[in-house]
Image: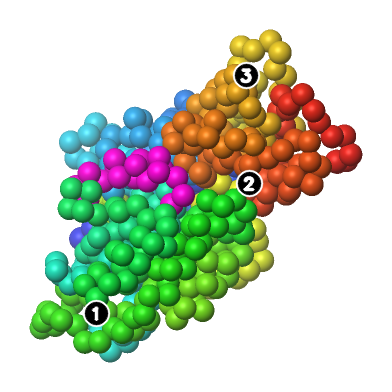
């Protein structure tokens, strides 16, 4: 181990980095990171390793001298944690790891330790911070700047899955309080609340699911002012009454009048205090299309729209900075001097151009891309359901499933497949039947559609919705007593 300008660096052989997960063939992460590595001129390379499980071959690579760090995506962002030496406070609270950093450690026999962290948090935080800096070009705004207690500045997150937890953490870094959660599902909200008991104890993470709540809690003269919103739901048009109510509730928040005025606190130490946004900030984590329905609504109400590509870029920067320094701290992940403005500008330009031409971008292909070009190095194999009457016909690899579901057998199939970290779209005329599973699994893994199998139009809509949500359908399980055969291919 040696030093570089006072910073510890790993053995020169640690030049191989990459992306682990499945499906990942359409990810633009290698292009983004390899552009940065080529500009740095250190001979590092970023590849990909397609796997749906944490396997011995992967662990051998992570512990090798050639390993220099990696990105981790679905479905192993949680299952990788027991194999790491440490995880950061950010990963501990959000329960997920998307970045592994090889950190120098003199006390370790190997002279390094593997530390996992969640750079999605910095993707959210630094995308919002960048827009705030652009609104106030004359101010120097530190990455550690916060709103002081008692300001009355609050935040909102729309959603309920892993991205929501990252967004909650990011908004709390700004000192926003309370943070409100707009979600149709009480169980998903409770799961987020359980991850942040200290915020709940302060009166934060308040569930909003109706415009009347918005009026009573946020539209009164003494109500906290919503300064930032993060959208963390899929970017397709709402269909069910519950989905429409999410948009209605969000629109009620967006329509609340805003006058930034002058800060009501001392700005003598301006590098540590955040200014009010001149236009309130709305960050949409979905990025296909870049201008989503929710982002258009926010812009129409006078909010500053920030598309999800900006968050993806910022989390990519954070990964690069941490790998370069062998340090998972928020301070390092937010330090633009590590890569420099020219490299960051080139990477941003590449990412924006790719997002306009490609369906997927930087490690976020985890939920919607399909590995159609390469055989994965770790196959899922046959699904052991131990149900003699159930036959799953393999079609390529298991990226998403569409299950016609009622009770009994279907519930057993869904439970078994979900436990294997597979992604499922289930269909059910009575959504309450699957309420327990919906509460236990995030919407990015498990989506339930209201569905009548006797209606051809609904069948076609369900298949279309599946394609929009996961981009492709691999396995269909039908347990209904009725099926139409006119669908064709």
Position of residue 165 in the picture relative to residue 398 (left or right): left
The answer, for residue 84, to whether it is visible in the render is: yes
Q: Earlier in the sequence, mark 2 or mark 1?
A: 1
Q: Which residues are magenta?
A: 182-199
Q: Magenta region's main secondary structure?
A: helix
Residue 409: assigned label: 3
Query: Where residue 481 sits in the image (x, y, percent)?
Result: 77, 24
Residue 348: assigned label: none
Q: How many marks?
A: 3
**Secondary structure of residue under mark 2:** helix
Q: Earlier in the sequence, mark 3 or mark 1?
A: 1
The residue lying toward the viewer, choosing from 140 and 276, is 276
Residue at 51% from the left image edge and 44% from the top image edge: 443
Residue 470: assigned label: 2
Residue 275: assigned label: 1
Q: Nearer the viewer, mark 2 or mark 3?
A: 3
């Amino acid at each position: 181990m040696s030093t570089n300008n006072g910073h510890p660096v790993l053995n020169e052989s640690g030049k191989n980095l990459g992306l682990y997960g499945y499906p990942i063939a359409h990810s633009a992460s290698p292009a983004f990171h390899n552009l940065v590595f080529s500009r740095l001129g250190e001979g590092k390379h970023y590849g990909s390793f397609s796997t749906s499980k944490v396997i011995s071959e992967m662990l051998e690579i992570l512990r090798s001298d050639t390993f220099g760090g990696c990105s981790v995506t679905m479905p192993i962002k949680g299952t990788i944690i027991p194999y790491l030496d440490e995880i950061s406070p950010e990963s501990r609270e959000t329960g997920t790891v998307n970045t592994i950093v090889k950190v120098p450690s003199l006390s370790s026999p190997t002279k390094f330790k593997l530390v996992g962290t969640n750079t999605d948090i910095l993707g959210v935080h630094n995308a919002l911070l960048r827009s705030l800096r652009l609104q106030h070009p004359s101010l120097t705004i530190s990455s550690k700047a916060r709103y002081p207690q008692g300001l009355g500045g609050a935040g909102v997150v729309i959603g309920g899955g892993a991205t929501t937890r990252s967004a909650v953490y990011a908004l709390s870094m700004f000192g926003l309080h309370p943070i409100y959660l707009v979600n149709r599902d009480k169980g998903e909200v409770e799961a987020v609340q359980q991850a942040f008991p200290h915020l709940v104890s302060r009166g934060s993470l308040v569930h909003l699911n109706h415009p009347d709540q918005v009026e009573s809690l946020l539209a009164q003269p003494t109500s906290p002012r919503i300064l930032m919103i993060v959208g963390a739901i899929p970017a397709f048009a709402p269909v069910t009454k519950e989905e429409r109510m999410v948009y209605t509730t969000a629109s009620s928040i967006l329509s609340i009048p805003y006058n930034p005025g002058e800060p009501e606190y001392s700005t003598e130490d301006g590098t540590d205090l955040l200014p009010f946004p001149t236009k309130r900030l709305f960050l949409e984590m979905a990025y296909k299309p870049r201008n989503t329905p929710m982002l258009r609504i926010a812009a129409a109400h006078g909010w500053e729209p920030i598309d999800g590509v900006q968050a993806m870029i910022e989390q990519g920067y954070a990964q690069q900075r941490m790998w370069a320094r062998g340090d998972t701290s928020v301070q390092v992940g937010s330090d633009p001097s590590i890569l420099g403005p020219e490299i960051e500008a080139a990477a941003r330009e590449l990412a924006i151009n790719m997002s306009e031409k490609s369906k997927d971008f930087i490690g976020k292909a985890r939920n919607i891309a399909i590995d159609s070009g390469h055989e994965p190095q770790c196959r899922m194999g046959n699904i052991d359901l131990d149900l003699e009457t159930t036959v799953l016909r393999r079609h390529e690899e298991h990226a998403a499933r569409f299950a016609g579901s009622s009770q009994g057998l279907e519930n057993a199939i869904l439970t078994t497949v979900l436990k294997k970290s597979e992604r499922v779209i289930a269909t059910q005329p009575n959504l309450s039947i699957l309420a327990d599973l919906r509460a236990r699994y995030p919407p990015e893994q498990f989506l339930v559609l209201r569905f009548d199998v006797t209606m051809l139009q609904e069948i076609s809509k369900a298949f279309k919705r599946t394609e929009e949500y996961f981009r492709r359908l691999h396995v269909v399980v039908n347990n209904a007593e009725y099926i139409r055969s006119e669908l064709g291919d």
